[in-house]
């Protein structure tokens, strides 16, 4: 049956919805004069029909198209005023992607026809949406993510699998490759409990990239928010769902980094792909003094107006689609301050944030904010709701500065090590909501942090102007790679100390892809444009010893109850700790830290004696963690063990494998090597 207009249809649901006799088509636009559905041949190359939607209810154009079946390729066109001075950019020569499309027939690629100064029709350069029968489950799977013991591993689907020797070539760089047993086996052996996938919605390169021969490696320029990127999921939603299910079957929860703060349509010079052509003035936050310009609170050249009902609706439908169709455990929200922006500024009770927290599908999913954007008052660490996690850049910077050797960091380090209660506990928030990290996708990798004093971003084509200039990094005397064995040994020791600090701290740790095995980006601290070996995981060149050291740390974290936890350390006894405080801060001489000790800017050693109640019939646990950033070894007087007990070394980062033999049967004083982390636990004396 040839598709044809069959009736007025309904204004709900938005998008193209297949039914028994065709499809209901509904499209929001408050300012358009007409909306047309454009149908294409099976190859998505030739427009075979253009059907003007006959009805309008409020701001929704709608109609029922008979004979339209699953698999049909389609796009939209919108007619209306072309008046940028009033914020309107309608152009019926531009084929537009349905914002509620759930599958595309090809990736977005930049082409001159997509830009506003091109007079010709853009259909030849546009992906076509594929109409799909609804297959969305009614509810997401049970939550696998557990805040009490979580350890997150951040990875891009493409970069993680592109060079894996055991993944078949056609599957590399895709969700199917991520589901490969060899890939999942690696994550299980490492011991992380969750992966945080970088953005996976259909996205496009920034306009400046093709001329430089660059392509996007990260996916932070979304266009179709409800559709997986065809480069990552050629099989569409079933492929995504299968990969998520495989990870969850292995005991690994799955989070997704979502970008709802801006779109890939860039500024007024950028391509017209979807929202701009459908209703620019409604979807975007425009400059009130000059509506031809976009407000840029994101640093990405436009800002979605998420406090407006149609934009909020799109964001919620996108989140529900990923939660239900993919079966995700939750989300990390890119530049989450923008999600809470009203015209007058950030509001933690803004419409979208409030809607997420009460939505029956989303409120039980994990929600993690990147708590800043580039707009006025955009830095909002600690301002999100009590059950949200937040990326804790205060932790990152403090740990870096302590190990770099900056003066006066001890007190701040203790606060970060203990869970950043100054940020998270004031409103009775569990400190597990502090997402601690030392490195992430955005910035130096961990090995580059200890190898470069300045960024090396020339390959990005922006004259080394992009990327953060404040890295708190160090290089041990030579910038970049070196064959000097002493410098290489110092850098390796620093990597182990940084990893130990992260994984022994209270809060939820996050590792960036490859930091557990020494992955370098050659000093590039903004590798978004490096869809190549620079940003891909090198499976054959990984540092197996460092990987095993990291896995050992993760096992220790799971085993010792005093390390993770939802409550802030308060330096007082708790139930089940036999009168010992949950943390005692000590000097190297074994005495309690005093104000003068905290104020000593040259103090380079943090010593925490931790006590945690046993679970069930398990006994109380006592652990001592020593972070020593000094350039020479130091002797530390340990707390007196209980009767019949002694201190035993669990981890020494000064040793490449983290192991250290202790010859004294019950040491009272322990030598701690320069720039190292030592962890000991109280254990029973062996029977004589």
Image (cartoon, grey):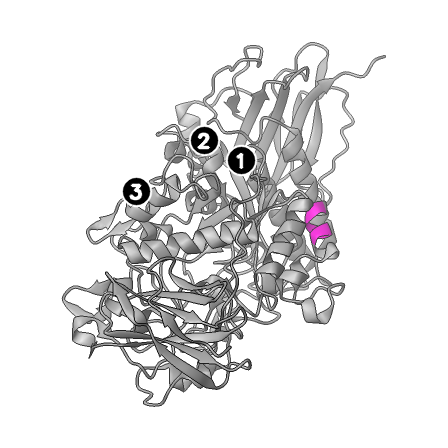
Where does the image place residue 634, in percent across and percent down from the top left? 61, 33
Q: Check the picture and name the quadrant holding the C terminus.
A: top right
**Residue 140 location (% of width, % of height):** 53, 45
Label 1 belongs to which residue? Answer: 147
Q: Residues within 10 Å of mark 2 (few under 14, many from 20)?
A: many
Image position, residue 330 (x, y; %): 50, 46
Of callouts 2 and 3, the N-terminal one: 3
Residue, far left:
289
Please tell me whether residue 611 is drawn above or below residue 476 in the rendered image.
above
Give the camera-side residue of 635 and 274: 274
Classify residue 645 by image quadrant: top right
State the mark number for residue 430.
2
Circle nearer the N terminus (3, 1): 1
625 on left or right of 597? right
Mark 2 and 1 residues: CB-CB less than 8 Å, in contact?
yes
Q: Is residue 263 visible?
A: yes
Does dot 1 land on a helix, a strand or a loop?
Answer: loop
Q: Residue at x 60, y 48 (%)?
A: 494
Classify residue 169 by image quadrant. bottom right
Q: Is residue 269 left or right of residue 367?
A: left
Q: Is residue 42 left or right of residue 412?
A: right
Query: Which disc is residue 348 wearing?
Result: 3
Identify the residue shown where x is 51% and y is 81%.
Answer: 44
Secondary structure, magenta segment, majority class: helix
Q: Earlier in the sequence, mark 2 or mark 1?
A: 1
- Residue 88 or 491: which is nearer the viewer? 88
Element type at marker 3?
A: loop
Q: Residues within 10 Å of mark 1 (few under 14, many from 20)?
A: some
Magenta segment boundaries in residue numbering = 184-188
Q: Is residue 13 left or right of residue 167?
A: left
């Amino acid at each position: 049956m040839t598709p044809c207009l069959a009736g007025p249809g309904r204004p709900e649901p938005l998008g193209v919805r297949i039914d028994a006799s065709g499809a209901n088509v509904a499209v929001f636009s408050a300012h358009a004069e007409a909306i047309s559905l454009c149908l294409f041949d099976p190859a998505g190359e030739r427009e075979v029909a253009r059907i003007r939607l006959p009805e309008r209810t409020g701001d929704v154009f709608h109609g029922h198209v008979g004979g339209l079946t699953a698999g049909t390729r389609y796009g939209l066109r919108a007619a209306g005023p072309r008046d940028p001075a009033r914020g309107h950019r309608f152009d019926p020569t531009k084929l537009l992607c349905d914002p509620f499309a759930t599958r595309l027939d090809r990736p977005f690629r930049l082409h001159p026809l997509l830009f506003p100064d091109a007079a010709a029709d853009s259909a030849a350069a546009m992906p076509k949406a594929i109409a799909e029968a609804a297959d969305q489950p009614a509810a997401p799977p049970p939550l696998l993510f557990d805040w009490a013991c979580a350890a997150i591993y951040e990875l891009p689907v493409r970069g993680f699998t592109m060079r894996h020797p055991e993944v078949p070539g056609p599957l590399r760089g895709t969700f199917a490759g991520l589901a490969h047993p060899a890939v999942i086996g690696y994550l299980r052996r490492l011991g992380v409990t969750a992966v945080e996938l970088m953005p996976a919605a259909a996205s496009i390169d920034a306009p400046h990239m093709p001329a430089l021969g660059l392509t996007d490696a990260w996916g932070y320029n979304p266009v179709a928010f409800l559709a997986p990127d065809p480069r990552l999921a050629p099989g569409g939603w079933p492929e995504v769902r299968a990969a998520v299910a495989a990870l969850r079957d292995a005991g690994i929860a799955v989070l997704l980094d979502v970008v709802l703060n801006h779109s890939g349509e860039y500024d007024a010079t950028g391509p017209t792909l979807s929202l701009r052509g459908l209703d620019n003035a409604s979807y975007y936050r425009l400059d009130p003094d000059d509506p031809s310009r976009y407000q840029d609170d994101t640093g990405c050249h436009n800002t979605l107006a998420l406090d407006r009902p149609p934009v909020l609706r799109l964001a919620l439908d996108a989140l529900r689609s990923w939660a239900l169709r993919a079966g995700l455990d939750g989300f990390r929200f890119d530049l989450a301050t923008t999600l809470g922006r009203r015209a007058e500024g950030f509001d933690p009770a803004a419409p979208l944030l409030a809607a997420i927290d009460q939505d029956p599908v989303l409120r039980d999913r994990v929600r993690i904010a990147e708590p800043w954007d580039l707009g006025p008052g955009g830095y909002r660490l600690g301002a999100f709701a009590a059950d949200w996690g937040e990326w804790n850049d205060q932790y990152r910077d403090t740990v870096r500065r302590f190990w770099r050797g900056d003066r006066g960091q001890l007190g701040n380090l203790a606060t970060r090590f203990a869970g950043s209660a100054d940020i998270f506990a004031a409103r009775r928030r569990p400190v597990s909501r502090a997402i601690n990290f030392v490195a992430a996708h955005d910035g130096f990798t961990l090995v580059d942090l200890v190898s470069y004093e300045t960024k090396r971003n020339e390959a990005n084509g922006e004259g080394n102007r992009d990327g953060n200039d404040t890295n708190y990094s160090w290089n041990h005397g030579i910038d970049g790679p070196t064959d000097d064995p002493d410098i290489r040994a110092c850098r390796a020791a620093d990597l182990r100390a940084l990893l130990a600090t992260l994984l022994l701290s209270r809060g939820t740790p996050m590792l960036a892809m490859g930091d557990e095995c020494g992955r370098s980006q050659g000093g590039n601290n903004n590798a978004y444009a490096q869809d190549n070996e620079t940003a891909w995981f090198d499976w054959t060149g990984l540092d197996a010893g460092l990987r095993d050291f990291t896995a050992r740390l993760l096992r220790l974290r799971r085993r010792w109850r005093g390390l993770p936890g939802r409550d802030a350390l308060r330096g007082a006894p708790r139930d089940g700790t036999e009168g010992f405080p949950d943390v005692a801060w000590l000097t190297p001489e074994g005495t309690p830290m005093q104000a003068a000790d905290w104020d000593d800017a040259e103090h380079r050693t943090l010593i925490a004696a931790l006590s945690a109640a046993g679970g069930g019939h398990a006994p109380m646990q006592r652990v001592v963690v020593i972070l020593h950033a000094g350039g020479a070894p130091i002797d530390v007087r340990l707390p007196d063990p209980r009767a019949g007990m002694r201190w035993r070394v669990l981890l020494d980062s000064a040793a490449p494998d983290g192991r250290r033999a202790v010859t004294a049967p019950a040491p009272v004083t322990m030598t701690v090597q320069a720039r190292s982390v030592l962890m000991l636990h109280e254990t029973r004396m062996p029977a004589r």
